[in-house]
Amino acid sequence: MTTEKKVLLRDSFYAAVIFAVVFGVIETYMVSIPFAAITAPIGGVLFGVFIYFFASSKIVAKQTSINDNGEEIILSGRANHFKGAEAVGGKLYLFKDRLEFKSHSFNIQNHQQRIDITDITAITFYSSLGIIPNGLQITTKHGLVEKFVINSRKRWKEEIEQLQFLA
């Protein structure tokens, strides 16, 4: 099994557990504890399975692929790009001269974003929901602040900084 599949399984499991807990708390207040004790775990499992198959689908892979024109892709992975309040799902790519994000069409704000490595002035970490350490914040010389939720954010930062050093 590839590392990407293992990470997707792990993330799907976490999504299932979080969904089950939140759903269980809500159902406890709306219906009863015995009802929530049965339906919340079932809902969590179904949600986790849905997330896994959605994220690994060929449709999403096709929609988030980019034309690399034979350039070497240094790093790539599933990502969310914050556009206002929406965490737009897609894929983030790192090339030797740029970061490029491409969303899938299951979002409200579909887009493709390019950030040249030479435009990046700061790379910092943040935590999603204030507690989940998976955010990478990119600040550009134009004053734009772009936020991404990704796996292996330390590796992304190191790779980008290495490219900045070489530029």
Image: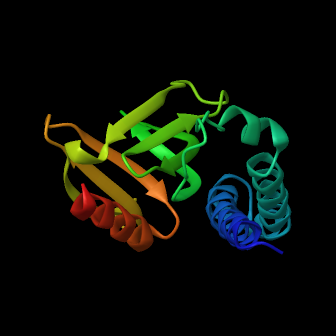
Q: Quadrant of residue 63?
A: top right
On the image, the x and y values in percent for residue 128 come to 40, 60
Above or below, 114 against 78 in this view is above
On the image, the x and y values in percent for residue 132 come to 44, 68
- Does residue 42 appear to the left or right of 70 in the view shown? right
Towards the viewer: 140 or 163:
163
Q: Quadrant of residue 161?
A: bottom left
- Does residue 97 appear to the left or right of 152 in the view shown? left
Count of numbered marks: 0
Q: Is residue 70 visible?
A: yes
Above or below, 145 against 51 in this view is above
Towards the viewer: 90 or 11:
90
Q: Residue at x 52, y 48 (%)?
A: 92
- Does residue 78 appear to the left or right of 83 in the view shown? right
Q: Residue at x 73, y 70 (%)?
A: 13
* Color scheme of the displayed model: rainbow
Q: Quadrant of residue 25?
A: bottom right
Q: Is residue 133 visible?
A: no
Q: Residue at x 78, y 46 (%)?
A: 54
Above or below, 63 against 119 in this view is above
On the image, the x and y values in percent for residue 136 come to 36, 58
